Image: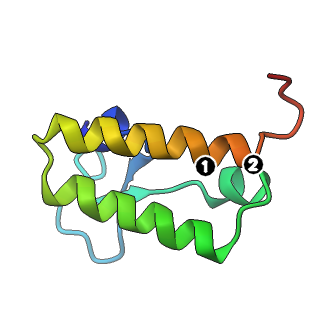
Amino acid sequence: KALDKAGLELNYNSVPYDTRKPFDPSGIRLGTPSVTSRGMGEPEMKQIAAWMDRVVSAPADTAVQETIAGEIRELCAKFPAPGILV
């Protein structure tokens, strides 16, 4: 929920050897096609990972979430989604 509030879209996924049930998985899935189709590459993926780390390190810190959400908007403005007119 904290990642979502920060503007980081992902979903729950099972991971190999996960001891939890499929409807309560312990992993997450980040859709890299949505990143690469915008023209982002390794540097942007490293930034996204850093944002994820900051949020999960302080999940109740709404100021961090708001700051990161703004930084994500700035990054996405540099890499518009194909086929979407703004």
Lateral position of residue 62 relative to residue 13, left or right: left
**Residue 11 pos. (x, y %):** 42, 45
* Residue ID at (41%, 38%): 69
Q: Which image quarter: residue 20?
A: bottom left
Q: Say which quarter of the image contains residue 18.
A: bottom left
The residue shown at (83%, 28%) is 84
Q: Which residue is mark 1?
A: 75
Examine the image and state in which quarter residue 15 appears.
bottom left
Which quadrant is the N terminus positioned in? Answer: top left
Are circles 1 and 2 on residues that touch, CB within 8 Å?
A: yes
State the residue position of label 2.
79
In the rendered image, which quarter contains the C terminus? Answer: top right
Q: Is residue 72 above or below residue 4?
A: below
* Secondary structure of residue under mark 2: loop
| Residue 35: percent from left, percent from top | 67, 55
Task: Please give left or right for residue 43 compared with residue 59 in the image.
Answer: right
The scheme the figure's colours follow is: rainbow
Amino acid under label 2? Phe
Whether residue 28 is visible, yes or no, is yes
At which x and y percent is residue 7?
Answer: 43, 38
Secondary structure beneath label 1: helix
11 versus 52 height, above or below: above
Residue 76 coordinates in the image, percent (x, y): 65, 44
